[in-house]
Image (spheres, rainbow, N blue to C red):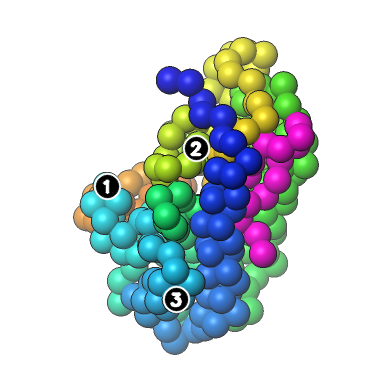
Amino acid sequence: MAIPLRKPHEIEKLRTAGIAVAKTLKYLQENVKSGMTLLEVDAMGEKYLNDLGARAAFKGLYGFPGAICTSLNEVIIHGIPDDTVLKDGDILGIDIGSEIDGWYGDAAITMPIGTISKEDEDLIACSKDALYYAIDIIKQGMRFKELSLALEEFIIGRGYVPLIKFCGHGIGKEPHCDPEVPNYLDSPNAKQGPKIKNGMVFCIEPMICQKDEEPIIDPKDKWSVRSADGLRTSHYEHQVAIVDGKAQILTQI
């Protein structure tokens, strides 16, 4: 399937949805504290999105039961909000999707709860730094596989490994579409496959594991994804549009 090329007015629609996500992430980052449950975080996020005129796009998507993904400690992505109580020293991944007028926004952060260890600070920094590194190096004509290889090399250079079998993605009038954007090279040759072009809109989301890149999906809830090593993980995500040959972040205030 061809990767959609968005017109400027469509990119602005996507930016509107993206800004709602960015504002909600900022609100949660400033207000989520130890002693709260993941269900309370979920309710706060959904209400804030709704107050901005956005719909929580993940609610019911593929059967997901929450409004936002709350991925705690060893859960890297797709954590289901439940009655787990946050405590000092936890790290919490928050992944939010929005929909406004049929256009979608999507971004994620991993945040500390209270005071966290230096090891967890470094883990979070890897996903955030990898994301901004990738955004900075994107240019029109670059192949997506070259971007994936650059992400993989950055993550390994920090002493971690990227989660496999999950990836970034295109976004537009549906929450997920082409292209797929893995955080690792999934073929022998980076000089093949689609090229990045003006008008493309997609999400980049480094998912960082400590030792084992293999995902384990929780057998009970069928959603929560952990690394096979059972160690803590981190995840950051932005939605970008290619404008004038470079990546513009749509999910920032």
Under circle 2, the secondary element is strand
Marks 1 and 3: which is nearer the front?
3
Q: Residue at (43%, 20%) from the top-left corner?
A: 1
Q: Position of residue 48 (x, y in %)?
A: 46, 75
On screen, residue 123 above or below 92: above
Check disc 1 and give the amino acid type. Tyr
- Residue 36 occupies quadrant: bottom left
Under circle 3, the secondary element is helix
Circles 2, 3 touching at the beta carbon (< 8 Å): no
Q: Position of residue 151 (x, y in %)?
A: 67, 36
Cα–Cα span, label 2 and label 1: 16 Å
Under circle 1, the secondary element is helix
Cα–Cα span, label 2 and label 3: 27 Å
Q: Residue at (54%, 51%) from the top-left corner?
A: 13
| Residue under pointer 3 | 51
- Residue 137 occupies quadrant: top right
| Residue under pointer 1 | 62
Check disc 2 and give the amino acid type. His
Q: Residue at (49%, 84%) from the top-left corner?
A: 34
Circles 2, 1 touching at the beta carbon (< 8 Å): no
Q: Residue furthest bottom?
A: 35
In depth, the one of 17 and 138 nearer the eye is 17
Which residues, given as a range, are shown in magenta?
A: 233-253
Cα–Cα span, label 1 and label 3: 24 Å
| Lateral position of residue 82 relative to residue 232, left or right | left
On screen, residue 206 above or below 128: above
| Residue under pointer 2 | 169
Check disc 3 and give the amino acid type. Asp
Q: Can residue 67 be seen in this snapshot?
A: yes
Q: What crowding class fits label 2: few (fewer than 14 Cα within 10 Å), some (14-19), or many (20 or more)? A: some
Q: Earlier in the sequence, mark 2 or mark 3?
A: 3
